[in-house]
Structure formats: structure tokens, C-alpha cells
């Protein structure tokens, strides 16, 4: 049985994580941490094997450090904070792994893979990401990661990345490639937060056995 703590458990993603873990075989939701619930993450780590963090850009890095110091593996979905500083902390910490995915939805990961392939032949492109109006960071972690992957493949992502924030949206992204007399568009829509949960559960199952202390991207688990 994998003991899981949900960090940010009262939030939109945290609530979906609690529901998913409670319904998953071989997992036990041992604690819910969130200021709104009056429960501090550090106080409940002793019960956990893995912590799943969907909090805020300000809170996530401190939470992950607390997990690693306590020997608890961290699965991180929070976006909008410096991953490189976290990489250093994870690589310096002994005994626990950190897995980060800017997007846990399989469709979004496939979009990134397809974008990388297309960019080799049609390098000029723009990214439009669209999210609900309570999202704290812009551009989204998914858009930044997509741009990074396209650039690694030789593509030219035009700046700025376009960020749309409106009520009614969940998480959406379009990559538009333009070439001689033609365009090619890729689009992914998360219309329900349940879209992220198979990826989160996969990461919870796999994080302890990852070969590296710090791993970024759901594609590494597929
Ligand atoms: P949200 O509804 O605002 O939830 C965040 C929750 O974390 C809030 O309840 C917040 O409490 C709590 N929190 C703040 N500081 C904390 C701390 N130190 N320890 C524990 N909990 C703390 O946000 P959301 O929409 O669920 O999104 C959360 C994050 O996930 C965002 O960064 C978002 O971009 C990201 N996200 C990632 C994916 C992915 O696939 N990787 C998908 C969707 C969203 P207070 O309200 O009291 O501050």
C-alpha cells in the first residue's frame, strides 16, 4: 500500500487528487494538508510514502524540500516556480525522489510530442494557452515546457506566448505552425480536472523507482 499525502488538498486540483487516490487500488490517502483545512504538510509527512503537491508557486518549492528532507517522494503538479532550484535541492537530498510534470494529461503530453515532430519540418510557430481566470501564473507551465521542447527540436517559437484567462475555461493549449502557403494547428483541451488523474496516479506508483532523484515530464513514465 502506498501512503499518499495530498498537499493543497482543499484546492481545485487537490480535491480531484483526493478523490482519485481514494478510488485507486494499492493507495491509501493518509492525510490532507492545506491552510484551509488547518493542516500543515510538515506535520503529516511522517505517515506518507509519497506527497502530491498542487499548491501555489510560492508554496511548492518549500513543500517539496520538506518532503525530501523527511524522505518522502514528491509528485509535483504546481507550476510557476523555478524548477532549477528545485532540481539542485532534489539532487542534494538523499533517499527520496522528486517527479514534476507541468501537465499530467496524456493528451497534452501527446500534443508536446507531436509539436516536437512537426517543428523539425515547420519550425515557425506560436503558442496560445487558455486557462480559468483564477490561475496565478502566466504563461502556463505547459506552454513553457512545450516551447522548450519545440526549441530543442529546432523550432522557432515566437514570443510572446499568448495567455487567455477567462471564467468557463479549465486548461487548453493550441500550437499553430505556419509554413509556405499553409498552417497546421494542434489543440488540446482539458475540460475536466479528472483528465490529469491517470497521470498523477501513474507518477505516484512510479516515483519511488525512478533512476534519477529529479525527473521532469510525464513522457518519461510512458
Ligand atoms: P487552487 O485551487 O488555488 O489550490 C491550491 C491550494 O493549495 C489552495 O487550497 C491553497 O490554500 C493551498 N496551499 C497554499 N499554500 C499551501 C501550503 N504551503 N501547503 C499546502 N497547501 C497550500 O489551485 P489549483 O487550480 O488546484 O492549481 C494548483 C496548481 O496546480 C497550480 O500551480 C496550477 O497551475 C497547477 N496545475 C497543474 C496541472 C498539471 O497537470 N501539472 C494541472 C492543473 C493545475 P489557500 O487558498 O489557503 O492559499
Image (spheres, rainbow, N blue to C red):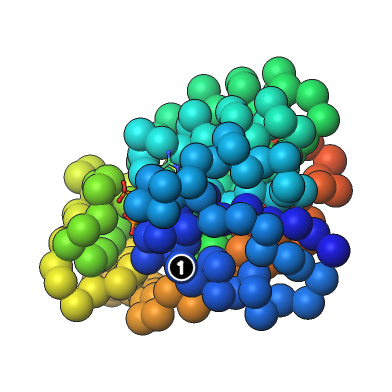
Q: Residues within 10 Å of mark 1 (few under 14, many from 20)?
A: some
20, 122: nearer the viewer: 20
Q: Does the numbered disc 1 mark a residue whose Cβ is under 8 Å from ligand 1? A: yes
Q: Is residue 16 left or right of residue 202?
A: left
Tell me the residue at 55%/68% (across/down): 18
**Residue 21, percent across and down?**
64, 70
Looking at the rendered image, the quarter that the C terminus falls into is bottom right
Q: Is residue 202 above or below residue 126?
A: below
Report which residue position mark 1 lands on.
Answer: 15
34, 69: nearer the viewer: 34
**Residue 155, percent across and down?**
42, 48
Query: Which corner quadrant of the image does residue 122 belong to?
Result: bottom left
Q: Is residue 74 above or below residue 102?
A: above
Instruction: Note whether residue 200 is visible.
Output: yes
Query: Which corner quadrant of the image does residue 124 belong to?
Result: bottom left
Tell me the residue at 72%/40% (across/down): 46
SS at mark 1? Answer: helix
**Residue 146, percent across and down?**
44, 53
Instruction: Note whether residue 147 is visible.
Output: no
**Residue 200, percent across and down?**
61, 63
Q: Is residue 188 left or right of residue 129?
A: right
22, 92: nearer the viewer: 22
Looking at the rendered image, the quarter that the N terminus falls into is bottom right
Query: Which corner quadrant of the image does residue 64 belong to?
Result: top right
Tell me the residue at 62%/43% (across/down): 44
Q: Is residue 98 left or right of residue 34?
A: right
Tell me the residue at 20%/45% (across/down): 160
Q: Is residue 198 above or below residue 211?
A: below
Amino acid at each position: 500500500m502506498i501512503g499518499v499525502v495530498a498537499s493543497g488538498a482543499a484546492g481545485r486540483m487537490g480535491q480531484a487528487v483526493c478523490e482519485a487516490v481514494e478510488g485507486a487500488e494499492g493507495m491509501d490517502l493518509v492525510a490532507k494538508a492545506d491552510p484551509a483545512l488547518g493542516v500543515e504538510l510538515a506535520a503529516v509527512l511522517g505517515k506518507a510514502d509519497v506527497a502530491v503537491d498542487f499548491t501555489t508557486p510560492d508554496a511548492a518549492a518549500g513543500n517539496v524540500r520538506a518532503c525530501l528532507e523527511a524522505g518522502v517522494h514528491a509528485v509535483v503538479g504546481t507550476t510557476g516556480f523555478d524548477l532549477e532550484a528545485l532540481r539542485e535541492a532534489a539532487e542534494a537530498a538523499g533517499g527520496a525522489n522528486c517527479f514534476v510534470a507541468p501537465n499530467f494529461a496524456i493528451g497534452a503530453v501527446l500534443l508536446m510530442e507531436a509539436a516536437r515532430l512537426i517543428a523539425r519540418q515547420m519550425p515557425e510557430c506560436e503558442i496560445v494557452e487558455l486557462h480559468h481566470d483564477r490561475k496565478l501564473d502566466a504563461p502556463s507551465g505547459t506552454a513553457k515546457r512545450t516551447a522548450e521542447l519545440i526549441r530543442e527540436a529546432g523550432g522557432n517559437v515566437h514570443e510572446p506566448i499568448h495567455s487567455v484567462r477567462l471564467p468557463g475555461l479549465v486548461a487548453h493549449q493550441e500550437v499553430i505552425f505556419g509554413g509556405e502557403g499553409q498552417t497546421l494547428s494542434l489543440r488540446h483541451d482539458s475540460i475536466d480536472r479528472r483528465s490529469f488523474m491517470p497521470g498523477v496516479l501513474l507518477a505516484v506508483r512510479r516515483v519511488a523507482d525512478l533512476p534519477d532523484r529529479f525527473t521532469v515530464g510525464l513522457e518519461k513514465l510512458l
